[in-house]
Amino acid sequence: MSEKITLNLNGEPVQVEVEPYETLFDTLRDRLELVAVKKACDTGGCGCCTVLVDGKSRYSCMTYTLSVRDNDITTVEGLGSGNELDPIQKAFIDTGAVQCGYCTCGMIMSAKNLLTQNSSPTEKEIRKGIAGNLCRCTGYKKIVEAVKLASD
């Protein structure tokens, strides 16, 4: 039986009707049409669906929507301000870390989580901070460069 709830999504209250078994991924992508959230593995192993819940990285494919209805949820669409990109988004573009783009939003959200906790991470800390996100296009060099640039 579906339930109408309000999510605090990207700083705004959003009403949505969800099923008890529905994942946050399905709610964000299918019901709210936030297409930056990507599905690849559907088992929490790739990080493409990473969002922030109360500022912490979370795989949306492994999170029931009803479990986060009282939390702040941020997707890549919620970063930046108006027409201004978040420094992490800009750094990914400036360093060419976007490649095919499939993992990019999840990487950016994990990087945001990392930089919120540690504003000046070492390369080793950056690699650990994005370790839950898989990129099939690169050796992560440009991604690490992007996170380092955003930290500067």
Image (cartoon, rainbow, N blue to C red):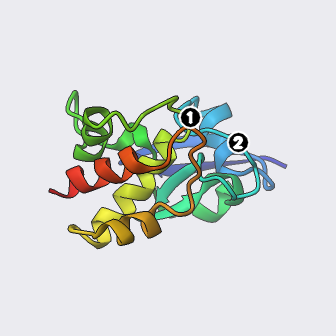
Q: Position of residue 84 (x, y in %)?
A: 20, 32
Left or right of 112, for residue 13: right
Depicted 138 relative to depicted 66: above or below: above
Left or right of 136, for residue 55: left
Q: Position of residue 25 (x, y in %)?
A: 65, 46
Q: Quadrant of residue 29?
A: top right
Residue 77 — which label? none
The residue located at (50%, 32%) in the rendering is 101
Residue occupying the far left of the picture:
152
Marks 2 and 1, Cα distance to the nearest angstrom? Answer: 9 Å
Q: Nearer the viewer, residue 27 or 145?
A: 145
Residue 40 — which label? 2
Left or right of 58, for residue 73: left
Crowding at dot 2, Cα within 10 Å, few <14 / some 14-19 / many 20+, comes out as: some
Q: Give SS at disc 1.
A: loop
The residue located at (29%, 66%) in the rendering is 116
Q: In terms of sequence position, does the residue under pointer 2 or pointer 1 come before the other? A: 2
Residue ID for mark 1: 102
Q: Give SS at disc 2.
A: loop
Amino acid type assigned to the residue bearing label 1 in the image: Tyr
Q: Quadrant of the C terminus?
A: bottom left
Say if mark 2 contacts mark 1, CB within 8 Å: yes
Q: Quadrant of residue 80?
A: top left
Residue occupying the far right of the picture:
1
Q: Is residue 69 visible?
A: no
Q: Position of residue 1 (x, y in %)?
A: 85, 49
Crowding at dot 1, Cα within 10 Å, few <14 / some 14-19 / many 20+, comes out as: many
Q: Position of residue 81 (x, y in %)?
A: 22, 38
